[in-house]
Protein backbone atom coordinates (compact mmCIF):
# COMPACT_ATOMS: atom_id res chain seq x y z
CA UNK A 1 0.00 0.00 0.00
CA UNK A 2 1.36 3.39 -0.94
CA UNK A 3 0.79 5.47 2.13
CA UNK A 4 4.23 7.08 2.20
CA UNK A 5 6.24 9.01 -0.38
CA UNK A 6 9.52 10.90 -0.46
CA UNK A 7 10.38 13.58 -2.97
CA UNK A 8 13.98 14.76 -3.29
CA UNK A 9 14.77 18.24 -4.59
CA UNK A 10 17.66 20.70 -4.45
CA UNK A 11 17.31 24.19 -3.09
CA UNK A 12 20.11 26.73 -2.59
CA UNK A 13 22.65 23.91 -2.87
CA UNK A 14 20.93 21.90 -0.15
CA UNK A 15 19.19 18.53 -0.31
CA UNK A 16 15.52 18.78 0.57
CA UNK A 17 13.40 15.71 1.26
CA UNK A 18 9.64 16.24 1.23
CA UNK A 19 7.85 13.56 3.21
CA UNK A 20 4.27 12.71 2.48
CA UNK A 21 1.79 10.39 4.18
CA UNK A 22 2.49 8.07 7.10
CA UNK A 23 5.94 7.19 8.41
CA UNK A 24 5.86 4.02 10.51
CA UNK A 25 7.94 0.89 11.12
CA UNK A 26 7.02 -0.32 7.64
CA UNK A 27 7.70 2.81 5.62
CA UNK A 28 10.77 3.93 7.63
CA UNK A 29 13.04 1.76 5.48
CA UNK A 30 12.26 3.95 2.45
CA UNK A 31 13.48 7.03 4.29
CA UNK A 32 16.49 5.10 5.50
CA UNK A 33 17.46 4.16 1.93
CA UNK A 34 17.18 7.74 0.69
CA UNK A 35 19.24 9.11 3.59
CA UNK A 36 21.90 6.43 3.15
CA UNK A 37 22.22 7.26 -0.53
CA UNK A 38 22.65 10.96 0.21
CA UNK A 39 25.32 10.30 2.83
CA UNK A 40 27.14 7.84 0.59
CA UNK A 41 27.36 10.51 -2.11
CA UNK A 42 28.66 12.99 0.49
CA UNK A 43 25.54 15.10 0.37
CA UNK A 44 25.28 16.08 3.98
CA UNK A 45 23.36 19.35 4.11
CA UNK A 46 19.90 17.88 4.39
CA UNK A 47 16.53 19.44 5.12
CA UNK A 48 13.57 17.19 5.77
CA UNK A 49 10.27 18.94 5.16
CA UNK A 50 7.33 17.39 7.04
CA UNK A 51 4.61 19.62 5.58
CA UNK A 52 2.65 16.75 4.03
CA UNK A 53 3.50 14.13 6.64
CA UNK A 54 0.32 13.22 8.50
CA UNK A 55 1.72 10.70 10.94
CA UNK A 56 4.97 9.52 12.48
CA UNK A 57 5.81 6.60 14.78
CA UNK A 58 9.05 6.14 16.72
CA UNK A 59 10.55 4.01 13.95
CA UNK A 60 10.57 7.19 11.85
CA UNK A 61 12.45 9.06 14.55
CA UNK A 62 14.83 6.12 14.80
CA UNK A 63 16.02 6.78 11.25
CA UNK A 64 17.10 10.30 12.18
CA UNK A 65 18.82 8.97 15.29
CA UNK A 66 20.77 6.42 13.31
CA UNK A 67 22.21 8.82 10.73
CA UNK A 68 22.63 12.20 12.42
CA UNK A 69 26.12 11.38 13.75
CA UNK A 70 27.32 10.25 10.31
CA UNK A 71 26.00 13.43 8.72
CA UNK A 72 27.47 15.72 11.37
CA UNK A 73 30.83 13.96 11.25
CA UNK A 74 31.21 14.96 7.59
CA UNK A 75 30.31 18.56 8.39
CA UNK A 76 26.62 18.47 7.55
CA UNK A 77 23.36 18.34 9.41
CA UNK A 78 19.79 17.11 9.10
CA UNK A 79 17.37 19.92 9.86
CA UNK A 80 13.68 19.24 10.25
CA UNK A 81 10.93 21.65 9.20
CA UNK A 82 7.18 22.29 8.78
CA UNK A 83 5.87 19.67 11.21
CA UNK A 84 2.21 19.66 12.14
CA UNK A 85 1.45 19.80 15.88
CA UNK A 86 0.85 16.07 16.28
CA UNK A 87 4.07 15.12 14.53
CA UNK A 88 6.03 17.72 16.51
CA UNK A 89 4.53 16.38 19.73
CA UNK A 90 6.13 12.97 19.11
CA UNK A 91 9.58 14.54 18.62
CA UNK A 92 8.98 16.67 21.70
CA UNK A 93 7.92 13.73 23.92
CA UNK A 94 11.22 12.05 23.11
CA UNK A 95 13.36 15.13 23.73
CA UNK A 96 14.46 15.75 20.14
CA UNK A 97 14.12 19.55 20.12
CA UNK A 98 17.33 19.99 22.16
CA UNK A 99 19.30 17.65 19.90
CA UNK A 100 18.04 18.58 16.43
CA UNK A 101 17.35 21.85 14.65
CA UNK A 102 13.59 21.89 14.15
CA UNK A 103 12.14 24.91 12.32
CA UNK A 104 8.64 26.07 11.64
CA UNK A 105 9.44 26.79 8.03
CA UNK A 106 11.92 25.49 5.48
CA UNK A 107 13.41 28.92 4.76
CA UNK A 108 14.62 29.20 8.37
CA UNK A 109 16.54 25.96 7.91
CA UNK A 110 18.03 27.26 4.65
CA UNK A 111 19.10 30.49 6.39
CA UNK A 112 20.69 28.51 9.21
CA UNK A 113 22.67 26.34 6.81
CA UNK A 114 23.87 29.38 4.87
CA UNK A 115 24.86 31.27 8.03
CA UNK A 116 26.62 28.26 9.52
CA UNK A 117 28.57 27.59 6.34
CA UNK A 118 29.78 31.17 5.94
CA UNK B 1 -23.34 -1.96 35.24
CA UNK B 2 -22.03 -3.68 32.16
CA UNK B 3 -22.38 -1.44 29.15
CA UNK B 4 -19.01 -2.15 27.62
CA UNK B 5 -18.87 -2.65 23.87
CA UNK B 6 -15.95 -4.58 22.47
CA UNK B 7 -14.34 -5.24 19.10
CA UNK B 8 -11.61 -7.68 18.27
CA UNK B 9 -9.22 -8.15 15.37
CA UNK B 10 -6.55 -10.75 14.71
CA UNK B 11 -3.94 -9.77 12.19
CA UNK B 12 -0.69 -11.13 10.74
CA UNK B 13 2.47 -9.98 12.46
CA UNK B 14 3.84 -7.86 9.63
CA UNK B 15 4.69 -4.16 9.66
CA UNK B 16 2.77 -4.05 6.38
CA UNK B 17 -0.40 -4.37 8.50
CA UNK B 18 0.34 -1.43 10.79
CA UNK B 19 -1.72 1.01 8.73
CA UNK B 20 -4.68 -1.38 8.90
CA UNK B 21 -4.28 -1.66 12.66
CA UNK B 22 -4.26 2.16 12.95
CA UNK B 23 -7.41 2.35 10.82
CA UNK B 24 -9.19 -0.23 12.96
CA UNK B 25 -8.43 1.68 16.17
CA UNK B 26 -9.14 5.11 14.69
CA UNK B 27 -12.52 4.10 13.24
CA UNK B 28 -13.90 2.71 16.48
CA UNK B 29 -12.46 5.46 18.69
CA UNK B 30 -14.15 7.98 16.39
CA UNK B 31 -17.41 6.07 16.50
CA UNK B 32 -17.28 6.10 20.28
CA UNK B 33 -16.81 9.84 20.55
CA UNK B 34 -13.14 10.27 21.39
CA UNK B 35 -11.63 13.63 20.40
CA UNK B 36 -9.20 14.09 17.54
CA UNK B 37 -6.30 14.55 19.93
CA UNK B 38 -7.23 11.54 22.00
CA UNK B 39 -7.50 9.42 18.87
CA UNK B 40 -4.07 10.55 17.72
CA UNK B 41 -2.62 9.44 21.08
CA UNK B 42 -4.41 6.08 21.03
CA UNK B 43 -3.47 5.42 17.40
CA UNK B 44 0.22 6.03 18.06
CA UNK B 45 0.29 4.00 21.30
CA UNK B 46 -1.34 1.01 19.58
CA UNK B 47 0.98 1.30 16.57
CA UNK B 48 4.03 1.32 18.89
CA UNK B 49 2.69 -1.68 20.83
CA UNK B 50 1.99 -3.65 17.65
CA UNK B 51 5.39 -2.72 16.21
CA UNK B 52 7.13 -4.03 19.32
CA UNK B 53 5.21 -7.30 19.11
CA UNK B 54 6.02 -7.75 15.42
CA UNK B 55 9.70 -6.88 15.77
CA UNK B 56 10.61 -8.21 19.20
CA UNK B 57 8.07 -10.84 20.28
CA UNK B 58 7.77 -12.41 16.83
CA UNK B 59 11.11 -11.28 15.34
CA UNK B 60 9.24 -10.25 12.17
CA UNK B 61 7.87 -13.76 11.53
CA UNK B 62 4.77 -12.82 9.56
CA UNK B 63 3.21 -16.28 9.88
CA UNK B 64 2.38 -15.29 13.48
CA UNK B 65 -0.72 -13.47 14.62
CA UNK B 66 -1.43 -10.76 17.13
CA UNK B 67 -4.82 -9.89 18.53
CA UNK B 68 -6.17 -6.45 19.36
CA UNK B 69 -9.23 -5.98 21.49
CA UNK B 70 -10.96 -2.66 22.07
CA UNK B 71 -13.37 -2.25 24.98
CA UNK B 72 -15.32 0.97 25.30
CA UNK B 73 -17.31 2.00 28.34
CA UNK B 74 -18.63 5.29 29.73
CA UNK B 75 -15.29 6.25 31.17
CA UNK B 76 -12.59 4.92 28.95
CA UNK B 77 -11.23 2.82 26.14
CA UNK B 78 -9.23 -0.27 27.07
CA UNK B 79 -6.95 -1.72 24.39
CA UNK B 80 -5.53 -5.19 24.87
CA UNK B 81 -2.85 -6.59 22.58
CA UNK B 82 -2.09 -10.28 22.88
CA UNK B 83 0.71 -12.34 21.34
CA UNK B 84 2.32 -15.74 21.82
CA UNK B 85 5.86 -14.64 21.07
CA UNK B 86 8.94 -13.93 23.17
CA UNK B 87 7.99 -12.14 26.37
CA UNK B 88 9.32 -8.73 27.17
CA UNK B 89 11.44 -8.44 30.31
CA UNK B 90 9.93 -5.45 32.06
CA UNK B 91 12.79 -5.32 34.57
CA UNK B 92 15.29 -4.70 31.78
CA UNK B 93 13.47 -1.67 30.47
CA UNK B 94 15.10 1.72 30.91
CA UNK B 95 13.72 5.03 29.67
CA UNK B 96 15.52 5.99 26.48
CA UNK B 97 18.37 8.48 26.66
CA UNK B 98 18.14 9.86 23.13
CA UNK B 99 21.40 11.81 23.34
CA UNK B 100 23.36 8.73 24.36
CA UNK B 101 21.60 6.57 21.79
CA UNK B 102 22.45 8.99 19.00
CA UNK B 103 26.12 8.86 20.00
CA UNK B 104 26.00 5.09 19.89
CA UNK B 105 23.79 5.04 16.75
CA UNK B 106 21.27 2.97 18.63
CA UNK B 107 17.54 3.08 18.29
CA UNK B 108 14.71 1.61 20.25
CA UNK B 109 13.09 1.85 23.63
CA UNK B 110 11.02 4.77 22.41
CA UNK B 111 7.77 2.90 21.88
CA UNK B 112 7.19 2.09 25.55
CA UNK B 113 8.12 5.62 26.56
CA UNK B 114 5.50 6.94 24.15
CA UNK B 115 2.82 4.47 25.28
CA UNK B 116 3.30 5.53 28.90
CA UNK B 117 3.08 9.18 27.95
CA UNK B 118 0.11 8.92 25.63
CA UNK B 119 -2.12 6.56 27.62
CA UNK B 120 -3.50 6.82 31.15
CA UNK B 121 -2.56 3.28 32.13
CA UNK B 122 -0.21 0.69 30.68
CA UNK B 123 0.30 -2.80 32.07
CA UNK B 124 2.02 -5.93 30.81
CA UNK B 125 1.76 -9.48 31.98
CA UNK B 126 2.46 -13.01 30.82
CA UNK B 127 -0.47 -15.34 31.31
CA UNK B 128 -0.96 -18.89 30.04
CA UNK B 129 2.00 -18.48 27.67
CA UNK B 130 0.49 -15.34 26.24
CA UNK B 131 1.85 -11.82 26.50
CA UNK B 132 -0.91 -9.40 27.37
CA UNK B 133 -0.40 -5.67 27.03
CA UNK B 134 -3.25 -3.56 28.29
CA UNK B 135 -3.56 0.19 27.88
CA UNK B 136 -6.37 2.52 28.72
CA UNK B 137 -7.34 6.05 27.73
CA UNK B 138 -9.86 7.96 29.82
CA UNK B 139 -12.56 9.98 28.11
CA UNK B 140 -11.95 12.90 30.47
Image: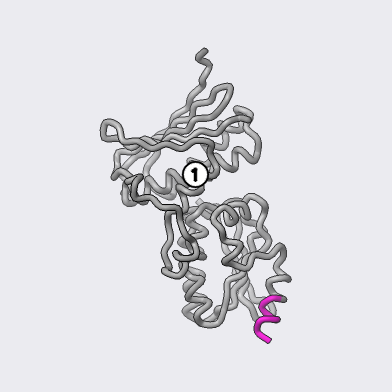
Q: Position of residue B11 (x, y in %)?
A: 40, 38
Which is more toward the observer, B103 or A50? B103
Location of residue A5 by image quarter: bottom right
Asked if A92 appears above or below B46 in the picture, the reply is below
Residue projecting furthest to the bottom: A118
Residue at the image position 58 percent from the left and 71 percent from the top:
A78
A92 with respect to B87 (left or right) = right
Q: Name the subunit of mark 1.
A: B
Give the structural element (helix, strand or loop) at label 1.
helix
Residue A113 sits inside the magenta stretch: yes
Residue B62 in view: no
The image shows residue B97 at horizontal and vertical percentages of 47, 59
- Please report the residue visible at 65 percent of the width from the left and 35 percent of the height from the top: B35
> Which residue does the numbered mark 1 point to in the structure image?
B115
Check the image and report above or below for B137 versus B22. Answer: above
Q: Residue B15 location, x and y as percent? A: 42, 50
Task: From the top left corner, tell me how far across and down residue A95 is, in percent.
Answer: 56, 58
Asked if one can make out residue A75 in the rendered structure from this viewpoint, the answer is yes
Does residue A66 sit above or below B74 in this rendering? below
Q: Please name the residue shown 57% across and 61% down the image.
A: A96
Bounds of the magenta span? Answer: A112-118
Q: Residue furthest top?
A: B1
Amino acid sequence: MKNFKINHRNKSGLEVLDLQGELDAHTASQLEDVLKNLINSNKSNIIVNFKDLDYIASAGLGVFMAYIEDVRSIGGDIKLTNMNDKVYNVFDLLGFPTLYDIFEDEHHAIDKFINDNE
Amino acid sequence: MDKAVSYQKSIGASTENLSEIRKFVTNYAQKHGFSKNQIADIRLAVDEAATNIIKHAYKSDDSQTLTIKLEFDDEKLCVTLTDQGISFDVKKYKSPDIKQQIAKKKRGGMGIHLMKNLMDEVSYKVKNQENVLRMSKNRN
